[in-house]
Amino acid sequence: MPLQREISGEPIVDMLHVGLHYDDGPEIMTDINLSLENGSFHFLTGKSGAGKTSLLSLMYLALKPTAGTVTVFGQNVAFADRDEMALMRRRIGVVFQEFRLLEHLSAYDNVAVPLRIRGMGEKEIKRRVGELLRWVDLEKSRDKICNTLSGGEKQRVAIARAVINRPEILLADEPTGSVDDDIGGRIMKLFIELNRLGTTVVIATHSQDLITQYPYPRIHLENKMLKIFPAVRRKFDEA
Amino acid sequence: MKPKINLKPHMHEELPLHKEGANVFLKIMTAVSVFVFTLMFSAFLVLDGVAQNWREGMDNTLTVQMMPSEEALPKKEEDARRQKVLAFFENLDSVESVRLIPDEEMQKLMSPWLGAKADLSVLPLPALLDVKLKAEASPDFEAMAAELAETAPYATFDNHRLWLGRLVKFASVLRLLALIVLLMVLTVSALSIFYAVCTSLGVHREIISILHIMGAKDNYIAAQYARRSFDIGFGAGLVGMLLGVSGILGISRVASVLNTALLGNLSLDTLDWFFIATLPLWSALLSMITAWLSVKRTLRKMV
Ligand SMILES: Nc1ncnc2c1ncn2[C@@H]1O[C@H](COP(=O)(O)OP(=O)(O)OP(=O)(O)O)[C@@H](O)[C@H]1O
Ligand SMILES: [Mg+2]
């Protein structure tokens, strides 16, 4: 079975002539064009400050482009009202670089947030969150308040929160930065599994290992521009 | 299957609103507002009752007396003076009929003092006018008196009416004042809630941004504020209402030594008490709605 689903039709994320700058700051991106096919898997690389987080923010609709158009799920972001944006965001899972957990809540409650936002019943939430916490090996820490967790534990909570609702798009910013290789491998397996089920994945990373280890193309940001490199490792090399 | 009741609904509150420092301020502010509201509301009702009482105390007739002039005038001129006052009252909108009390009647009225045979024409007795007011009229007696003084300075009407009229006016000014205080309390409370919400949204900007990115609508966030405000509005409202009721009871105990004949019935009726008892609920609802609208409005501007 191929890792990447063969999918035709409209791209799930489409960026056309996108430019971006923060308030009075300098341009971070100019004339970016990028189409992500539904079900694709990409790494996102670039030096620190190249704009990886910013590019992901455009995709998870936390930023609007200052030039050009961003289309997600076939909808032009510029024309979506607040509630439409909320509904689109529910279909996107995000792992933030600095986790951005709700520090006063337990690991369990953090992972439950996206489900509560959707108005899911507590019983179903308990089942789903329990299962996922087991998967990321956080069962013992489920009732610990987040600001008492270690960096690696926080990262796994952040990942669990991003995938709990089986998002259609998963955007992960350095998701394996604070965990050991063993857990890093598990996390990648989780992402690959989600991708196999149809989720479009973009992972921003500094890790050369990750890029060489997995057969996915790479979006590279440099000098406000974007290039796409094919996978380093070819698919049939996969063990 | 029995639905599981969440006994600690704030345990997983995403916005830690029930632990906010501003809550103490909001609680005190709400309690004080409801306390003042309770007192002012009952003051309003009581004043309304008192004014009503006084208004009813004024019957629908006026007695006008016209002093005879110092030097004896010919009968014709004396009649003209009387006619002038008669015309004055006849031309008033609030007057239904005016009747000059004829001399024979005067004679009868005076006979117990002066004897039936007395010749009134030699005495400088005032002439009397019986003025009947329209049933629904509530004329401005002050103005009427002033006007009459100008037209015919020798004529006056019973000043007990004037005095009652002044009291009624005073009561309605007080009532208006109570109403203004009520409105001010409401406005200040709403503004306090609005600014507390704005500050809180600023403090929790990061959490709100996270919730938004996870797909929370503004309503989801507004609901958390609404819930908090309802809780505070109800709890503090209950305290304020109980304090207010103690205040009313205290005041009415003091007031009971006053002349009830003058003030009339100072108590509130059952419906008024019922409304006062529901004040915590109103306070909760108003706090909730204010918070909800404030959040929605502020978030729309916050991006
Ligand atoms: N909120 C912000 N306000 C102003 N400037 C910002 C903001 N966020 C990022 N920038 C600027 O935008 C540029 C790109 O930042 P971004 O965080 O996207 O880079 P990055 O590739 O994710 O870096 P890193 O690998 O260190 O995470 C940087 O120059 C940064 O200073
Ligand atoms: Mg970054």
Image (cartoon, coloured by chain):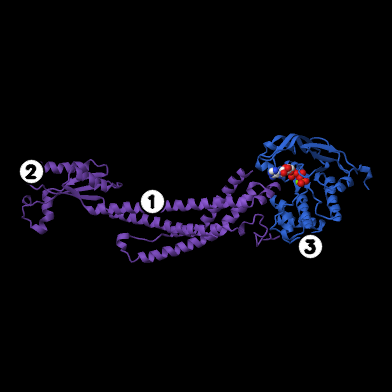
Chain colours: A blue, B purple
Tell whether label 2 touches label 3 (CB within 8 Å): no
In the structure shown, which secondary structural element does the residue marked by tag 1 occupy?
helix
Query: Would you say B221 lies left or right of A111 here?
Result: left
Where residue A10 appears, x then y in whole percent? 79, 35
Where residue A2 appears, x then y in whole percent? 90, 43
> Chain ID for label 2?
B
Other residues around mark 2 within 10 Å, as few (<14) / some (14–19) / many (≥20): few
Query: Would you say A46 lies left or right of B247 here?
Result: right
Task: Please tell me whether residue B86 is drawn above or below residue B243 in the rendered image.
Answer: above
Quadrant location, the N terminus of chain B: bottom right
What residue is shown with label 3? A140
Image quadrant assignment for residue A15 = top right
Choose mark 2 or mark 1, whichever is in front. Answer: 1
- For marks 3 and 1, give the CA distance: 65 Å
What residue is shown with label 1? B176
Choose mark 3 or mark 1, whichever is in front. Answer: 3
- For marks 3 and 2, give the CA distance: 116 Å
> What is the three-letter code of the residue carrying label 2?
Lys
Where residue B261 appears, x then y in whole percent? 30, 62
Task: Please tell me whether residue B58 is drawn above or below residue B239 in the rendered image.
Answer: above
- For marks 2 and 1, give the CA distance: 51 Å
> What is the three-letter code of the residue carrying label 3?
Lys
Other residues around mark 1 within 10 Å, as few (<14) / some (14–19) / many (≥20): some
> Chain ID for label 1?
B
